[in-house]
Image (cartoon, helix red, strand yellow):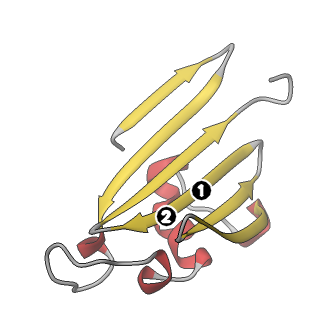
Amino acid sequence: IDLRYSSREQGEVTVVVAPVMRFADIGFNAKVTIEQLGTPEKIIKGFAPELFGKPVEDEDILETEVTEKDGLSYYQWAVKPFRLVTATATGNRMFILSVAASSRQ
């Protein structure tokens, strides 16, 4: 975890910046896409313990979407309860943002 902000009133934001070498034996400064690192299921399950403090089960993943913006592919998930996660890879890093909120937020 590179950054974590948590507040009872405002929810939680978590940011992870991970080297792609964690996923694949790719040379230094390689240009890597998130698709080269794994499927949406592999990525969310691989990072769930860091992001959520426990593994994620299939039934916890409410929605998965793959989108593209400005030439980068993004994996996006809605995870129970009240958590949104997005990930992309560029250069030799993977970037993950997780936002959690309560039902009142």
Q: Residue at x 53, y 78 (%)?
A: 42
Q: Quadrant of the N terminus?
A: top left
Farthest residue, direction left = 28
Q: Which mark is residue 86?
A: 1
Which of the 4 image quarters holds residue 89?
A: bottom left
Question: CB atoms at circles 2 and 1 under 8 Å apart?
Answer: yes
Q: Which mark is residue 88?
A: 2
Q: Estimate the x, y position of residue 81 in percent, counting from the top left.
A: 77, 45
| Relative horizontal placement of residue 50, taking residue 65 as reference (left or right) | left
The amino acid at mark 1 is Thr
Residue nearest the observer in this picture, 68 or 84: 68
**Element under disc 1:** strand
The amino acid at mark 2 is Thr
| Relative horizontal placement of residue 98, taking residue 90 as reference (left or right) | right
| Relative horizontal placement of residue 89, taking residue 57 as reference (left or right) | left
Q: Estimate the x, y position of residue 51 in percent, counting from the top left.
A: 50, 49
Q: Estimate the x, y position of residue 72 in percent, counting from the top left.
A: 52, 69
Is 76 drawn above or below residue 71 in the view shown?
above
Disc 2: CA contacts within 10 A as few (<14), some (14-19) or many (>=20): many
